[in-house]
């Protein structure tokens, strides 16, 4: 349902620039504005179609899935895979330049308030932006510019981190973007130069000590839910409430019918009181860090059990269960950043000693090589003299969280080894 709403919001007002669709006056001091403009460049340049065709051609698949693909195929005529990626990088260089401008400024969602009617038209373009930056980094490596490539990957990861900090839907889109960039970086990891490995180690370490965007997202999500309170004070019809909360919940509809005029008048104040209580419970839970995030709190019914109490608690409970998946992704994200830090240190060690380390304690201190989710050291497995697997055993809800440097494929496969940063 959330993704369907996102697609719907993205389509509205498509003839206007994305920045105008936000309904916020640009200041020139917020990097979010440049990120939105960069996303607009990609959308209007039909980047998604070009990327899909490039991927289909690379995989040897038939790319003719919609009318516009014929145009895209014509653009790539006579090009091999690397030439297509370089062509894409050049064609959308303006988007890259806008991102480089964005990271020189604070990046925050410019919306002061959100409500049930707030649109997020830029989010569909942010995923394209992650794919574009991953492609730019790949092309930079093809020219032998490893350090610049690492900087581009980490620039993208930083932008996706900032995107995650307003609402749950923003968080989910930003997490997808980060995963796209992490996967590309993990693929290149075993072949990075010594200086690039050092740069990545420093950047990943800096990112690992930053507060997770989950904290701010949770706070933003409760601000968004508080917008319901304002709507309730104005007067919201049964149809409006059912559209928000009752589409798939017969219990809510039955409870709503039981409310008399007096109870309906009290609905805004009771909802606000119960929402404040839920916000306090969830704030304490979030402060517990990744190990706590695996198990979201269960909201105990508050004293009082009349129809009004039940309606307001049902309204809140129908929203809060959606926190479980973002919380799990946030916990895994913290582990992935630590894995990237340790993995880059392993590559740096290999350059300095001519071999992979026998154990992680040879590379970094004990705390740095410990999984923040399990409190156990990461497991290092050497695949050959160059490649390795680094993983956390995870917990039952995550399974193993693995950073893998795979062995090179045969002549028909990719030129580089194909590691992956996978959640299994």
Image (cartoon, helix red, strand yellow):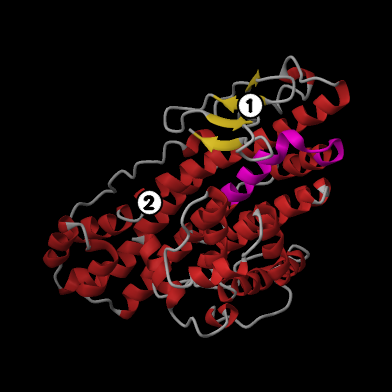
Residue drawn at 81 percent across, 46 percent down: 146
Front-most of residues 17 and 247: 17
Which residues lie in the magenta part?
Answer: 178-196
User: Is 37 above or below relative to 409?
Assistant: below
Residue drawn where x is 82% and y is 26% of the image: 349
Tag 1 residue: 390
- Percent across and percent down for residue 208 are 69, 41
Establish if 23 lies above or below 299: below
Q: Quadrant of residue 5?
A: bottom left
At which x and y percent is residue 234? Answer: 33, 80
Secondary structure that dominates the magenta span: helix
Return the x and y of residue 64 as percentages of the image width and height.
Answer: 45, 63
Q: Residue lying farthest top?
A: 358
114 and 342: which one is in front? 342
Magenta stretch contains residue 192: yes
Q: Is residue 370 visible?
A: no
Q: Quadrant of the N terminus?
A: bottom left
| Residue 176 seen in the figure | yes
The answer to whether the residue labelled 1 contacts the one labelled 2, judged by CB atoms less than 8 Å apart, is no
Q: Is residue 171 magenta?
A: no
Q: Residues within 10 Å of mark 2 (few under 14, many from 20)?
A: few
**Quarter where residue 130 is shown:** bottom right
Along the viewing direction, whichever of 368 and 160 lies nearer the viewer:
160
Q: Residue at x 87, y 25 (%)?
A: 352
Q: Splitting the image into 4 quarters, where does residue 8 fall? A: bottom left
Q: Quick one: SS at disc 1? A: strand
- Which of the labelled discs sits on residue 322, or is there none? 2
**CA separation, marks 1 and 2?**
31 Å
Q: Secondary structure at mark 2?
A: helix
Q: Residue at x 63, y 49 (%)?
A: 181
Q: Earlier along the polypeptide chain: callout 1 or callout 2?
A: 2
């Amino acid at each position: 349902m959330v993704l369907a709403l996102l697609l719907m919001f993205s389509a509205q007002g498509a003839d206007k620039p994305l920045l105008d669709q936000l309904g916020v006056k640009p200041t020139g001091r917020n990097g979010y504005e440049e990120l939105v403009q960069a996303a607009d460049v990609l959308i209007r340049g039909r980047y998604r179609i070009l990327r899909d065709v490039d991927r289909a051609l690379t995989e040897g698949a038939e790319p003719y899935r919609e009318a516009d693909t014929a145009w895209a195929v014509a653009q790539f005529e006579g090009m091999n895979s690397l030439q297509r990626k370089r062509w894409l990088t050049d064609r959308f260089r303006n988007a890259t330049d806008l991102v480089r401008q964005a990271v020189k400024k604070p990046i925050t969602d410019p919306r002061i308030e959100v409500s049930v009617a707030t649109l997020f038209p830029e989010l569909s373009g942010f995923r394209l932006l992650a794919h574009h930056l991953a492609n730019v980094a790949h092309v930079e490596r093809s020219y032998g510019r490893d350090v610049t490539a690492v900087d581009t990957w980490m620039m993208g990861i930083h932008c996706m981190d900032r995107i995650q900090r307003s609402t749950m839907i923003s968080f989910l889109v930003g997490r997808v973007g980060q995963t796209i960039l992490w996967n590309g970086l993990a693929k290149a990891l075993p072949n990075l130069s010594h200086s690039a490995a050092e740069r990545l180690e420093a950047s990943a370490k800096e990112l690992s000590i930053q507060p997770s965007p989950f904290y701010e997202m949770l706070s933003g999500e409760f601000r968004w839910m508080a917008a319901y309170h304002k709507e309730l004070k104005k007067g919201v019809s049964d149809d409006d409430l059912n559209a928000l909360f009752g589409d798939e919940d017969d219990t809510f509809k039955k409870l709503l019918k039981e409310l008399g005029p007096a109870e309906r008048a009290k609905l805004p104040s009771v909802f606000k009181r119960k929402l404040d209580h839920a916000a306090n419970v969830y704030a304490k839970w979030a402060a517990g860090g990744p190990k706590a995030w695996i198990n979201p709190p269960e909201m105990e019914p508050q004293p009082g059990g009349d129809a009004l109490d039940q309606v307001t608690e049902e309204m809140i409970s129908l929203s809060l269960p959606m926190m479980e998946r973002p919380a799990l992704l946030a916990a895994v994200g913290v582990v992935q950043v630590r894995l990237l830090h340790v993995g880059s240190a392993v590559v740096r060690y290999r350059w300095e000693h001519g071999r992979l380390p026998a154990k992680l304690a040879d590379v970094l201190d004990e705390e740095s090589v410990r999984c923040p989710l399990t409190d156990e050291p990461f497991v290092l497995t050497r695949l050959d003299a160059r490649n390795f697997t680094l993983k956390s055993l995870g917990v039952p809800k995550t399974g193993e969280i693995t950073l893998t440097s795979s062995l090179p494929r045969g002549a028909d496969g990719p030129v580089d080894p194909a590691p992956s940063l996978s959640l299994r």
